[in-house]
Structures are given as C-alpha cells and as structure tokens.
Image: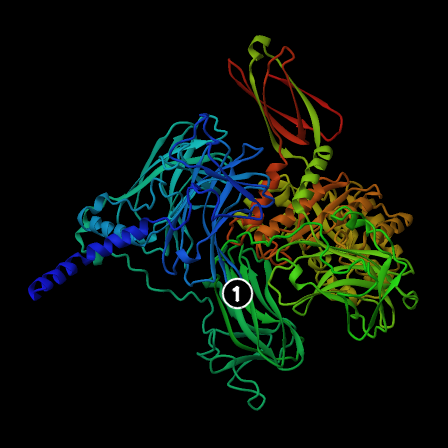
Amino acid sequence: MPVGLLLQLISLLFLLAPLFSSLSLKVMADSNIVMNGDFSDGIEPWYPNGCEAFVVSSDPFSSDSVSDSSSCGYAVVTNRNDTWQGLEQDITTQVSPGVTYTVSACVGVSGPSHESSEVLATVRLEHEDSPTEYLFIGKTYASRDNWVDLEGTFSISNMPDRVVLYLEGPASGKDLLIRSVTVRSSTSRDFQETEENTAASSDFPPALNIIKNHDFSDGLYSWNSNSCDSFVVSSNDCGLESYAVVNNRSETWQGLEQDITDRVSPGYSYKVSASVSVSGPVQTSAQVLATLKLEHQSSPTEFQLIGKTYASKDIWKTLEGTFVFSGRPDRVVFFLEGPPPGIDILIKSVTIHCESDHQFEYTQSSREFCPAPKADHHIFLNSSFSDGLNHWSGRGCNLMLHESLADGKILPHSGTCFASATERTHKWSGIEQDITERVQRKLIYEASSVVRLSHSHHTVQATLYVLYPDQREEYIGISSVEASHDDWVNLKGKFLLNGSPARAVVYIEGPPPGIDVFVDHFDVKPAEKNPPSRRPYVESHAFGMNIVSNSHLTDGTIEGWFPLGNCHLRVAEGSPRILPPLARDSLRTTDGYLSGRYVLATNRSGTWMGPAQMITDKVKLFVTYQVSAWVKVGSGGLTCPQDVNIALSVDGKWVNGGKVEVNDGDWHEVVGSFRIEKQAKEVMIHVQGPSPGVDLMVSGLQIFAVDRKARLSYLREQADVVRKRDVRLKVTGLDPSELYGATVKIRQTRNSFPLGSCISRSNIDNEDFVDFFLNNFKWAVFGNELKWYWTEPEQGSFNYRDADEMLGFCERHGIETRGHCIFWEVESAIQPWVQQLSGTELEAAVESRVTDLLTRYNGKFRHYDVNNEMLHGSFYKDRLGFDSRAKMFKTAHELDPSTTLFLNEYHIEDGFDSRSSPEKYIKLVHKLQKKGAPVGGIGIQGHITSPVGHIVRSALDKLSTLGLPIWFTELDVSSINEHIRGDDLEVMLWEAFAHPAVEGVMLWGFWELFMSREHSHLVNADGEINEAGKRFLEIKREWLTFADGVIEDEEAGLEFRGYHGSYTVEVVTSEGKYVKNFVVDKGNSPIDINIDL
C-alpha cells in the first residue's frame, strides 16, 4: 500500500475516533444489562427468593382476552411469607464500580386487598469478609388495578463478590407482578446531558428549569418525601405522562421537596410554577403552598412563602410565585405542602426559572455558586487544650495540664497534653465549658471525649447543665462509660435542647471525691444524621422447628452436648414426657411427646457449669427465637431457691434466654427468647445457675423461630371479638323518598382503647414533640417529675413546679394522667436523706410524702403507681415491715378515693427474671389484699426485648385471674434496626389490644435521646418519624373502622362491625350532605345507633 494512502487512512481513523467512541458509549448506555428483562424466555435467569414465581402471557389489568402485543408476558411472584421475598437476578458480571445505573421496572400487585402496596427495587452486595450491604434503588405504590413505573438509580464504589438486583416489598400474601425490568448504564447519557445543559446555560439561560425531573418522568428521582410517603402513577400503560402522589400525611407541612442549593444564587429573583391538585376527604378545596427552606448551621432555619393556591379534587390548578434570598445558606430546599392531614397532594410538574436579567451577563465561571467559607462547626473552644486551659473551668475542682504522669506511664492519647480535674469535692466535680452562645434548640449535638482515672475504676459521665430564662434547671445525661487507671476509654453521646437556654454548660463527672479525672480531649459538634434503616436481609428459615440437636435424647446418648466447665454429663430417665406448655402451640412436630430422658450435670463447681451445645450455624440474624425447656435441681439445692438460666454465649457475651426459680424437687418450665442482630463467630447455648455442688437436670430443650405474622393473624381475630361490636345504624329525620339511594360513609375518628406515653418537662418546650404527642396519645405519665427524689431532693426542699407545669399542659389539652410514682422500693432510687432516717423518722416521712402528694393533686391523676417494683426492692419493707406497703395503699385511697391504685413491675411478661414471674406477682397482690390494701390495677412495665406472643399471652392470662385491670405502663422495645423494632412493637401492641383484661398501654417515650433504652425511639431527635414510628402509626390506623353503604330500604339502616370509639357518619342524599357524630361504647351485644338528620 502506498505510504500516502496509508497516512490518509490513519488520519481518517483519528477523525472518526470520537464518533466511534460516542457510538460505543451510546450502545453501552442503551443496552439493558438485565437478561430476559421482559420475561419473553420464561423465568430464567430470574430466581424467586424464598417464594415461588412463574410467567403468564395475559394482562391482569386488561379486560381484553388478548394481551397487549407489546408485552411478551409478565412474572408472578407468589407464596410470599415476608416483605423481602421477591424476584432477583445476579448481575455481578454486568456492573462496574463508579458507574451510575438507571433502573426502570413496570410492576403491579395482586391479592385480596384493593389497598396499594409498596414495591421496592434493591441491590444486594455480598462480601466474603464483611457483612452484606443493601442499596435502596427506588420504590412505588402499586394496586390491583394497573401497572405502575418503579424507577431509580444506583452505583457501587468497590466491587463486591456478588451483586444481586431484586424486587420486593408488598405485604405477605400479596403477589408481586413484574412486566419488565431494565438496568442501563447512565454514564454517557449523563455526560451528554451535562454538555447540553452547559450549552443551554451559556446560550439560553433564562429558559433553564433548575428543578430536576420536573415532570416526574424519571419517577421520584431528585425528590424527597418530607415525613410522609410518595409515589408516581400514570395510566395503565407504562411510560405515559406521570404525576406524583404525596400521601400518608399527618401534618400540614408534610409534602414533597427538592434540594436546589447548587442551582440558585443569592440576590436573584426566581419564578415558580407548579401544576397541583388534591385527593382524599376534601370538602370543597384545600390550600397548597410552595415554600422555600433556608437552612443555616449557625442560625435558625428560615422559611419563605413563595405562593399558594386552592385546589380541589379532579382539577389541576397552577400555583405560582417568586422568591429571592440573601446571604449564603448552607442548604436551600424547595417544597410543596399545605393541605390538612389525610389529604393527598398531587403534583404534575414544577418549574423554577431565574427572572433576573443581569444574572447571565457574567461568564460561566463567575456564575458558579461558590460554597460559603467553611465555618468552625465545633461548639467547644480549645477542645484539645492546645491553648492551655483557656475557655475551661473547674466545677468544684482544680484543673491542671500534663504532658505525662506516673513517670511517663500515662501519656496523652492524642496530641501533646491532657487535662486533669484534681481536688474534686463531689461526684459532680469535673472539667466544664460554657457553650451558651454556641448551641441552638432542637439541634442534635454529639459530645466526645477520651478519659481516664488516677486510680480505681468508676463510671464517668458527660452531663449538660441547662438554666432556662425562668430559672428552671435541667441536667441531661449525655453518655457514660466505665473508666479506670489502666487505659484511656472513649466517652461519646448525643444531646438535644428542647428549649432556649439562658445558660448551657457541659461537664464531666461521676467518680467519688478524691479521684482525679484525666481528659485527653473534649469536643462537642453538630451530630451527623444517621441514614434510615433498611429492612435487613433474613436468611431462609423454618418456623417452629427445633434447632437444638439431640434435644429428646432418643438414643440415650449425649451426642451433640458437651459439659461447660469441669462438670460431668450423662443421660438419665424420669423427666416429663410432654413438651413444655409454652412450646406446644408453636412447635411443628408430629406429636407433643418427649422420650422421658434428660441430661444430668453433676460435679458442678461453678454456677455457670452445665450442659452446652454450639448452634452458630443454626441461628439466623434478626430472627426471634423462643426458648423452652424442663429443668430441675438435685436434692442439694432444696435448702434455698435456685435460679436456672438458659443462656447464650455470643462471641463470649452473655445473652439471657430465660430464667426460672426452682425451690422444690419438681420439674419446672423455663421460657424466654432471644434474637441476634450482629454477625457472630460463635454462638453457644448452655444451661446454668444453681449453686456449686447442686446437680442440674435439663429435658426437652427447644429453640425455634417464631412466626410473627401467623401470631398477628390470630391476634387480629381475637381483637375482633374483644374490641369490636355489631352496630345497627338507622337514619331518621328525612322523607323516605329523599333517603332512598343515599350514600352513607362511616369513619372512626378515635379508638377508645387508652394509649399514652411518658413525657418530661423539657419535652413540652419542643413544638415538634408536642405535635406528635397530641396527635397520637390521650394519656400521659411523667418520667421523673412526680417521683419523691425529684419533688423533695433534700428534706423540706420541695420542687413541684415541673409536675405542676406538666399537669397544666395535660389539662389544657384534655390528656388523662397516671401518677408515677408515690414510692419506689428499690434502694438505689431513694434519695440519700431518706436512706439516713431512723425507723420512726422514716415512718413519719413516708406519711408526710403520701399526704402532701395526694392532697396537692387530689382528683388530678386517674392512676397512681403506689410503690414501684416491690418484687425487685425491699427498702421500706426491710425498715418498716410488710404492713407498711399495705398502709401506703390504704392511706392513698383515703386521701383520694377517685384514683385507681396500681402495682408496677418489670420482666413479668418475658420470662427473663426469676424474681418477677407472674406467679410471684399474683402472690404479692394476694398478700397485700389480705392486709387490706385496696389494689385497683396491675401494672406491667413492658421493657421488653425480642418479644414472643405466646409468652406474653401466658403471663396476661395468669394475671387476669386476679380480676383486676391490667395496663402496660412503660412499654418500649429495642432493636438496632428500625424495621425489627417496628415488628416488636406491633407484637406487643396487638397482644395488649387483643387481651380482654388489658385496659390500656403507655409507651415509655417515643423521641430519640429521651428514652430510657437505646434504639427504642419511634421519632428521631430531629423530628423525623422512623420506620418503627411509621409502623406505630399504621397500627393506630388499623385500629379504626371504616364502612360505606347505600340506603336501599324503608328501614333506612346500615349494619357494620366496628371498634369501640368515636365515629363520624356522612349521609349524602339528592338534596344535600349531612354529617353527624356518634359513639360505639364497649360491649359485646349489638348496639342500635339512631342518626337524626
């Protein structure tokens, strides 16, 4: 080939290279990396995860006998027992790190209910050496009537061992329908859009809409639901014009928002136009607002009203307005809000254009929005002591700086020096800093320090002292840690101020006087927001199947068992031949009989010794297991009661699986439960507890996964019997001709089952807390403010101010109150001056306490917990005798006969504590009643972990034999995962609601940082309702009855079965609409309700 021609070809190739490259990128971007995305080849290579799937060709949402030719079929995912079960495909070889992928799916649902269901797209990233990760792609709400689009994006930073795409979400029992799935690389498309947008910005900037995905053609991409739910709908065919629906709104300010921070600049005018409508129980029209939120880290958030309109059902309205802002906020958010709770906002499109002519006279580079100078987000000054002890002071102590101590054995943990609090005169003495001018109310802060002690080991605590403008004081515990002389330890926690302080001081305290506290650094800064929980992936498992090997000892050997410690194990005969009672209803066995053999542990030289078994590979994460067994102790243990505990060792950490007290020679059932929420290397089950030298016998140990959903199905049936009533509604007052054909809508507005929460004095200064509380509860109990140590911390020095203000708050809002508590039997909860009284002085002080309290608040509190936790403490009984307990009840009743007097105890309902079994509680009640105590109610606190319905129900059944009302008085559940926390709360609320002896439930709080247990809140500290809180609201909605009908006869009646409570009925005739209220009282027999129009 001639050289000249060769050079010409090379030049041509260089010229065409960009075209080839662009073409290559376009092909890659447009190619669907999902195989068989339209199910034209059946179900392969899709895989049903824990369920079943098949492909059909007809369209379930079409009335035509012939399916749409554009679709080859759709997948049906059926026999689903959990929300996470769905259809998945391995896409490991099709994806790469750093690339953004766009997902689009056409989905529907099928099942017994017409209600919409959530459908999620998720990516699972599996790693051999680290926990599995889950990436949320997007979600939509599908119903039985039509196909809907589900869209979203994802990218991965590092390549895992396996990447799996799957669709999940609808409730168990509902089938998931999937018409098509596409996943495409959006890299080249994004590049192309960026180029086009840059060109548009340069050439035609005034026409540029700064709202991303303004018409929802990309689903909800770039939009965020503000404390509510949202989804995008279109016509039955996927891909046509879309609009957003914002639903499950419980506040007027809840709506749809978009962060526009990097697309707007101060000083410029922007014009907003949105096409909106509303849906739901709208009488005539509802107000829709466009609002701008300007967030600042160093000052309060600002809100600007942009514009408003009044929208009605089935009519799209245009909402218009303009906005300008000054300064440089940290975040600019546009959002739509406004209609009353319960009304959905519909949004077809949103546009925001810059109106300022001079904005585009600058060059492109000058128009870039430069971030504001980075502020110092640290609230503490000189946190690492680099400037000596400036800004620090000693609270009842002296401060010193050190480069080292103890001949160089104690060196700084970081930096060049550390501080010490010396010559401490009180436990509260320590290093402190005033942060009054640098903190804001309703913002979450994180405090962190590294501490050490001069000698010994004690608890070290970080505390916030707050003085309010009205001179009210508050001490907020931020965090605590066990510290010692040996090494530095981390002290870390969060806090939030509900009210505006006149003074705020953070300090470190805790050890007794004389012990120096070393502080390496001490910092306070705004806390980072935690990402929301995703429902964890749960491996496939069988419910009701025992995971203990050789539990029945059928072959007479101890195979599978080993002795923990130097005790001896052997098989003996003579144990019960039936399963323990609480295991019988749950286990899926062919029969309920055992072999009559048991494991005998002898030569025990420690309480922890006994039979053990490894179950590491059998326990699944986030699964609740019930534990049940027969246990007995040898004759050497009959001289005093013996505890027998079924325990787990999870990587060396003890986990309680149930405990029982044995004080005779009989077999006893021990019950309990557990759940593991972090991957463990070793899980061992073992039985322990009796004193050294006492033989231990174990028979029929059962550990099995609990079917929560099956239990809830049973409880709903029970609640239908216990909490509902047949209602015959008759409409009168109008001419029969007008009533005939009238439509009747019945809506329950409130269930009469009492539901309340714990509150504190500072909580009522937080408007967000108050809104959630008043919208969801009708009862309150004070966390600490009524306790004796709070109302009289020093003898003769009274503080009723907090309780007075809280009671006034409740009275203004019609909230009923429980009094907690008059006395507390546990010595650690009793103030020092009371502990130091002599017998006669203590008796007088007790009399004075009950008289002062019940005289001051006569008739104010519906309930009182008279003497808290008498099964766990004995301070007053030991000093004044058992009769003093009965006298407390009698005196309280004499002073205020209108109030109901309760006992209050914990671990009654879960089998975890041998001191507080239902049998012991019943015995205590009988003993008090024999002494003349007017016991009026039974309080079960309900601080429970991994609840099991059968165990809770058994305790309630036993306590109900007393014939007294039962209340859950301090209910909370704890899990690191919000979805699992919601599951537990659902179990407990339904167990209470479905039991005829339970007459009310009090939650022990709901707001993060104001709970007694970690990971138990329903609302995050910033006011966002988490997944557990959403479940709580769903349960409340499920406890309401709705019925519709048409009057078709002369009787003008309508029959329905509804929950007890308050109702509204709407009757629409040809002449007009009538609205009336009525109440369905408690009762079992049918009730006749006459509605006179």
**Image mark count:** 1
Coloration of the structure image: rainbow
Instruction: Classify residue 690 by image quadrant.
Output: bottom right
Regarding mark 1 in the picture, which secondary structure is present there? loop
* Residue found at the far front of this picture: 1
Q: Residues within 10 Å of mark 1 (few under 14, many from 20)?
A: few
Q: Nearer the viewer, residue 721 or 329?
A: 721
Instruction: Classify residue 149 by image quadrant.
Output: top left
| Residue 344 image point, x, y percent | 46, 35
233 lies above or below 441: above
| Residue 428 image point, x, y percent | 63, 71
Decide if residue 227 is on the left or right side of residue 914: left
Assign the C terminus to one quadrant of the image.
top right
| Residue 1016 image point, x, y percent | 61, 54
Specify whether residue 840 is in view: no
Q: Which residue position holds label 1? A: 130
Going 56% across and 38% down the picture, which residue do you hit?
174
Q: Nearer the viewer, residue 178 or 691?
A: 178
669 lies above or below 380: above
Going 60% across and 49% down the picture, which residue do you hit?
982
Specify whether residue 50 is in view: yes
Q: Nearer the viewer, residue 89 or 147?
A: 89
Decide if residue 373 is on the left or right side of residue 16: right
| Dot 1 amino acid type | Ser
Assign the N terminus to one quadrant of the image.
bottom left
Decide if residue 448 is on the left or right side of residue 673: left
| Residue 537 image point, x, y percent | 56, 54
130 lies above or below 179: below
